[in-house]
Image (cartoon, rainbow, N blue to C red):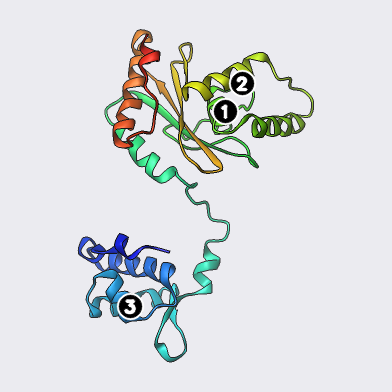
Amino acid sequence: MTDETDIEGRGAAVSGSAGRALLCLGLVLDHGPVSPQRLTSLSGLSRTAVHRAIHALIAQGYVRYQLGKMHVIVTAELRDSFRGAFFSPPGIDTVSTAVDAALKHRRIQCDIAVLSQAGEARIVETTTPDEDTEVDFFESDLASVLLSHFDPVAVTRMTARALRAAGGGVTVEPEFLDRYRQAQYQGYIWNAQQGALCLRVPGDSDQAIAIRLISRGSGRHRQRDCVETAEAIGRLLPGMFPNFATIRE
């Protein structure tokens, strides 16, 4: 449910009939079944604007009036249209926006990856969409940083599951555990050979989020480029990343 204090003044910030319709649709999703009068109060729009928005949404099959035409509710048609749709994973929207802003005018490739205890590590957003989005569980620094979100017991279970999925053709090397410990302690892994900085995004969710920055600059500037980009992201998301002083040493 959306807190009314969060939506106060929304109407003043929305322009255009499409924007007003989307605002009303969001409020019906949050508060429905809801009366037009209630929508007027929640949205900050005029009564006329709300009724026009409702009629536009009805015409598209997104909402309908309940019996007596006193309340508006989202249709089953709209609900069914979302089945099978891919939504942005939890926690990604804010991170992606900050990363996109920080990457402007920088020669940096970026991947955003997620990992849940029940799933596989995967890249969900990238600046190079033509490349493989799979993450090597046992060899990738990105996977190690994702794993560092979880405690050792959970990591042991996830590793056992990954070994079973690999069919016995993979062994756990000491470097795998070393990378996990490093990432858990520092919150990041810097790979000088690849020019890549992988960072854990702190959070209390049962899903881990990590960012990989890869510099496309010259060798001696790659570390600086990645760290400065991470710091730019951190300024947009205060408290997001650890102190990078140890990388510069």
- Answer whether residue 103 is visible to the viewer in this image: no
Query: Residue 213's image quarter?
Result: top left
Query: CA separation, marks 3 and 1?
Result: 47 Å
Say which amino acid is labelled 3. Arg
Tell me if mark 1 has few (under 14), some (14-19) or many (20+) residues whose alpha carbon lies within 10 angstroms of its own: many
Q: In the image shown, does 8 or 217 lie closer to the viewer?
A: 8
Q: In the image shown, does 150 or 111 lie closer to the viewer?
A: 150
Classify mark 3: helix, strand or loop: helix
Q: Are marks 1 and 2 in contact (CB under 8 Å)?
A: yes
Residue in view at x 79 percent, y 25 percent: 168
Q: Where residue 186 sits: x, y (%)?
A: 47, 21
Q: Which numbered marker is on residue 38?
A: 3
Q: Where residue 122 sits: x, y (%)?
A: 56, 36
Classify mark 1: helix, strand or loop: helix
Q: Which residue is mark 1?
A: 143
Q: Are marks 3 and 1 in contact (CB under 8 Å)?
A: no
- Eyeballing the image, is 133 above or below 224? below
Image quadrant containing the C terminus: top left
Query: Residue 32's image quarter?
Result: bottom left
Tell me if mark 3 has few (under 14), some (14-19) or many (20+) residues whose alpha carbon lies within 10 angstroms of its own: some
- Eyeballing the image, is 55 above or below 245? below
Say which amino acid is labelled 1. Ala
Q: Which residue is mark 2?
A: 139
- Eyeballing the image, is 112 above or below 40? above
Q: Which numbered marker is on residue 40?
A: none
Residue in view at x 50 percent, y 42 percent: 204
Classify mark 2: helix, strand or loop: loop
Image quadrant containing the N terminus: bottom left
First in sequence: mark 2 or mark 3?
3
Mark 2 or 3: the one toward you: 3
Query: Residue 100's image quarter?
Result: top left
Residue at the bottom extreme of this rendering: 68
